[in-house]
Amino acid sequence: MFYREVGEFKGTYAADQVVFPIRQDRYFVWAVVAFAFFGVPFLANPYWFSAILIPFLILSLAALGLNLLVGYCGQISLGTGGFMAVGAYAAYNLTLRVPWLNPLVAFLFAGGIATLVGILFGIPSLRIKGFYLAVATLAAQFFLDWVFSRIQWFTNYTPSGSLNSPPITFFDFTFDTPARKYLLCLGFAVAFAMLARNLVRGRIGRSWMAIRDMDVAAEIIGIRPLYAKLSAFAVSSFFIGVAGALWAFVHLGSWEPLAFDVNRSFSLLFMVIIGGLGSILGSFLGAAFITLLPLFLNQLPAWLGLHWSTALISHLESMIFGALIVFFLIVEPLGLARLWRVAKEKLRLWPFPH
Amino acid sequence: MGFFLEVLIGGLMAGVLYSLVALGLVLIFKASGVFNFAQGAMVLFAALSLVRLMEKMPLPLALLVTCVIMLMLAYAIERLVLRPLVNQPGISLFMATLGITFFLEGFGQILWGSDIYKLDLGIPKQPIIILEKVFSGGILVGSDDLFATIVSGALVIVLAIFFQKTRIGRALRAVADDHQAAQSIGIPLNQIWLIVWTVAGLVALVAGVIWGSRLGVQFSLSLIALKALPVVILGGFTSVPGAIIGGLIIGVGEKMSEVYLGPHIGGGIENWFAYTLALLFLLIRPEGLFGEKIIDRV
C-alpha cells in the first residue's frame, strides 16, 4: 500500500537512472545512513562499537570487494585473506617509511598496492576457471602468508613479527575513541558501497556479469575477457586492501600475519555466499550474520544455563557454518539478499494480494 | 650424491602420501564432477573414528565399524547435499563441499574429541639403510615410509582394476563421461554416487591411518587436503595415474626446494612451493599432465 512505484513519474533520463528508482527505497536508505551516522554514535556503548559494529563494517567492506569478484564476475577466490594482508602491511610500511603521509591517504595507497598484487594473481584467471582458479588463488594466500611472516623488511625487523599501528589522525583530529573509529569505518563503507553500486550498473559491471554468465558467449559479443577479468580482480583487491588496512589499523591495533590466514578467506567467502552472491546489500547482510553468529553462540549456553567449553562452542560454530552454507546453497542460492527482495515484492502488494 | 638420493627418496615417499589424499579427490571428481574439498575433513573424520574406536574394541572390528561409518557418511552426503544440488553448476557443488568440510571438522571433534591421539598399528618405525655398498654410509629410508608406499601402491592397483574391469567400475566411468547418457541407459545415478563417495571415504580412511600413524591423529590432518589440491591440479583432475605422478612430483619438488632453495630465500617455503609449481604448470597446460582436454562450448 505504501511501498510501490505507482504514481512516480519520471520526467528526465537522469530521474530514470537514479540508483534507487523507487522513492520509498531512497528515503529508507537515506534514513538508515543518517541513523548510522547521527543516531548510533549516541546510542551504542564502547563494547558494541569495538566488538560488533567496527568488525562488521570492515568485514562488509572486504565482503563487498570479494562479492564484486565472485558474485559479479564469477571468479572464485580463496585468497582474500592474503590481499587483506597486503593492504595492512602496505599501509603499515607507508606510514612507517613516509612519515608525512596521512594514514587515511596511506589506506588508499595500500588499496592501490593490493590492486597491483591482485592483478598479478588474477592473471591465471585468463587461462583457468572455476575451482582451478580457486586453487590458484589459494596459492596467492599461502605465498602472501609466507612473505609477511618470513621477509623481515615488511615487519620492520620486529623480532616477534607482530606490529602496532600508529594513531590515525586527520589534521588535528584523532580517531581514537571507539565512536570515532566507528564513524571512520562507516564513512569508508558507505563511500565504497556507493562506488560499487555505481560500478556494477555501468559498462564495466555489465561486462563482469556477462563474463560470469558465460564467458565464451561474452567474448563473442565483444567483451574482452582480459580487461573484464583483470579489472574485476583490480577493483576487488582495492576494496579488500583498504579493508585489510582498516582491519589492522582500526580494529586490531596490533596484529601478526596469523590475522590474515586462510580462515579469514573462508569466512569472507561464507559471508558472500550466505549474504547473497551478486548483491551489494548481501555483502552487508552476510558480514552482519557471520559477525553476530559467534557472539550469539557464546551467549547461548549462558542463557540456557549450560556450561559449554570454549572448544565445544568453536566446534559447534564451525558445524553450524558448514550446515548453513549447504542449506543456503540448496534452499536459497542467492542468499539473505534474496529474502529481502522477496519481502519487498510481497510488500508491494500488501495488504491486497491480488 | 648419496644426500641427493636421500632427499629424492624422502620426497617420493612424501609424494606417495599426497597421492593418497589426491586419489580420493580424483575418484569423486571423475564420477560426479564434484571437486570435493571435504576430502581432508573426511581423512580427519575417518582417522578420528578409528582411533577412538580402537580404545574400545580390537583393531579389525574397529576398522570394520569405521568402514560402516564412512558408508553412512557417504549416504548422508549423497542424500542431504548432492541430491538437492543435482544439475547445479560445479562451483556451487564445490562451495557445498566447503560447507561439508566445516561441518565435518566440527562434528568429528565434538563426537570424538579434539586432542592428539596416537595411532599405533604396529608398523616398525626404525629406518633401514640401503645401498650401503654403492655410497659411503648408504641411504636412510624410514620403514614406515616404505610401508605407506606399499599400501598406496596396492590401493592404486586395486582401484585401477576396479575401474577398468568390474561392472560398477564401468558404470562409474560412464557416469563420469555424461550424467544424462548414463542415466538413460539405466545406470542409477544415486547409487553410483553413493558407491563413489564410499570408496572415497575408504581411501580417506587409508590416508588417515597412514598419516595418523606418522603425525598422530589431530586436527591438522584436515589441512593435508590443501596439500593435495596442487597435486590434482598438476596431475589432472580426471586421471588416477595423474594423481600418483602429480603427488610424486610435488613431493620431490617440495623436498628439493626446501633443501636446495630454502636456505637462499628463507625457510618454510614448502607451504606455497607446491601451489606455485602447480600454478605455473596451469598456465602452460590448463588441464594438467594427464587430464582430459577442456573444450568450451557456448
Image: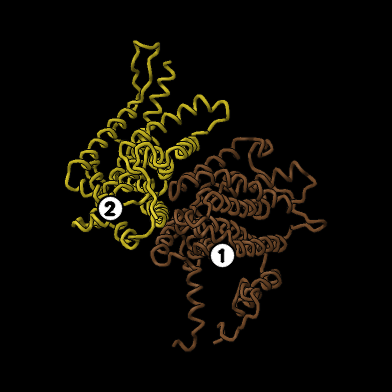
Chain colours: A brown, B yellow
Q: Nearer the viewer, residue B156 or A313?
A: B156
Q: Nearer the viewer, mark 1 or mark 2?
A: 2
Q: Is residue B268 left or right of residue B175?
A: right
Amino acid of disc 1 = Ile
Q: Chain of mark 1?
A: A
In this rendering, is residue B233 above or below A168? above
Amino acid of disc 2 = Asp
Q: Nearer the viewer, residue B145 or A185?
A: A185
Locate the N terminus of chain A by quadrant.
bottom right
| Residue lying at 47% horizontally and 53% vertically, measured from the top left | A311
In this rendering, is residue B282 above or below A17? above
Q: Position of residue B65 (x, y in %)?
A: 24, 48
Q: Which mark is residue A280?
A: 1
Q: Which mark is residue B178?
A: 2
Q: Are marks 1 and 2 on the same chain?
A: no
Q: CA distance from mark 1 to mark 2?
A: 37 Å
Most extreme residue toward the right is A172
Q: Regarding mark 1 in the picture, which secondary structure is present there?
A: helix
Q: Quadrant of residue B235?
A: top left
* Residue B70 in sight in this render: no
In this rendering, is residue B256 above or below A79? above
Most extreme residue toward the front is A221
Q: Position of residue A100 (x, y in %)?
A: 80, 46
Q: Residues within 10 Å of mark 1 (few under 14, many from 20)?
A: many
Q: Position of residue B291 (x, y in %)?
A: 35, 41
* Residue A296 in sight in this render: yes
| Residue lying at 21% horizontally and 49% vertically, measured from the top left | B171
Q: Position of residue B131 (x, y in %)?
A: 34, 15
Locate the C terminus of chain A by quadrant.
bottom left
